[in-house]
């Protein structure tokens, strides 16, 4: 058994895997070091696949793992021939590679600190879009409007109006993002003649009303596992 640690801007995602499947999965806030250390110490694993989209967070978690063997896959050179560009985040590479490996095509949404829309067609990454997520937009409002203190982690009541300024901000952000994502994805479906829509990430509630779209909370972990096995020979038991 081995571990996968996906370090984001806000949260850390940890999965424990055997050769065939992911047996356990946890998401914790990056700031909760005590819980993170307890998880590391409670599981008998000395090998980790470590990847990140945030270099500062990556360094801090690496220090916590001192004494444990790990492999970093911060950049993926072998995938250049697949159309991925040099500065593409490993989480996006993992998501799209997992779909490509299974000879599928689709639109992949990763909804978190940043929202990402990626296109996979004819076995290749065709391009994508990146824009702020819900909490990033709320942080921006709180920073630039000194009389507003909208709370992060609000309930995604899509379609409902706020009854105070803070709730109005949250309702506005959630509804604008949801409607914008759905209309953009539908346009891309027609443009690229794609049927399947996959989505993952902590902001999944934005689009969960779309019953035909496929929610896979473990999509990134599955892709990292694929990459580690195919390019780094991480067939650890």
Image (tube, helix red, strand yellow):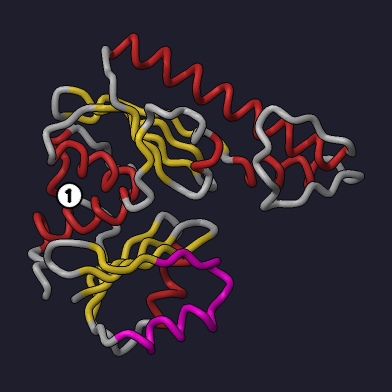
In the displayed structure image, the side of residue 49 where residue 202 appears, left or right: right
* Residue occupying image coordinates x 9% and y 55%: 230
51 or 104: nearer the viewer: 104
Dividing the picture into quarters, in which one does residue 191 lie? top left
Q: Which residue has dot 1 on it?
A: 77
Q: Is residue 7 magenta?
A: no
Rendered location of residue 146, percent (x, y):
88, 45
Residue at disc 1, secondary structure: helix
Q: Is residue 180 above or below residue 66?
A: above
Dividing the picture into quarters, in which one does residue 212 lie? top left
Rendered location of residue 80, percent (x, y):
16, 40
Rendered location of residue 113, percent (x, y):
54, 47
> Can you say which quadrant of the picture contains the N terminus?
bottom left
103 or 82: nearer the viewer: 103
174 or 24: nearer the viewer: 24
* Residue occupying image coordinates x 21% and y 38%: 99
Range of magenta residues: 26-43
Q: Is residue 7 above or below residue 135?
A: below
Rendered location of residue 178, percent (x, y):
57, 28
């Amino acid at each position: 058994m081995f571990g996968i640690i996906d370090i984001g801007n806000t949260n850390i995602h940890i999965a424990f895997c055997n050769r065939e499947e992911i047996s356990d999965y946890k998401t914790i806030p990056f700031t909760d070091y005590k819980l993170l250390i307890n998880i590391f110490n409670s599981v008998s694993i000395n090998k980790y696949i470590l990847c990140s989209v945030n270099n500062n967070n990556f360094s801090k978690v690496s220090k916590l793992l001192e004494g444990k063997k790990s492999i970093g896959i911060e950049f993926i050179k072998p995938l250049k021939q697949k159309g991925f560009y040099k500065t593409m985040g490993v989480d996006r590479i993992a998501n799209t590679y997992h779909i490509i490996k299974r000879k599928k095509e689709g639109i992949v949404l990763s909804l978190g600190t940043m929202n990402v829309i990626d296109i996979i067609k004819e076995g290749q990454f065709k391009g994508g879009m990146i824009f702020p997520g819900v909490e990033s937009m709320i942080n921006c409002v709180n920073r630039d409007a000194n009389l507003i203190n909208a709370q992060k982690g609000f309930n995604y009541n899509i379609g409902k109006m706020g009854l105070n300024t803070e709730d109005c901000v949250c309702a506005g952000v959630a509804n604008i993002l949801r409607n914008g994502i759905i209309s953009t994805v539908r346009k891309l479906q027609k443009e690229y003649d794609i049927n399947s829509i996959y989505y993952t990430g902590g902001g999944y509630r934005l689009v969960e009303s779309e019953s035909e779209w496929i929610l896979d909370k473990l999509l990134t972990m599955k892709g990292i596992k694929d990459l580690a096995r195919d390019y780094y020979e991480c067939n650890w038991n």
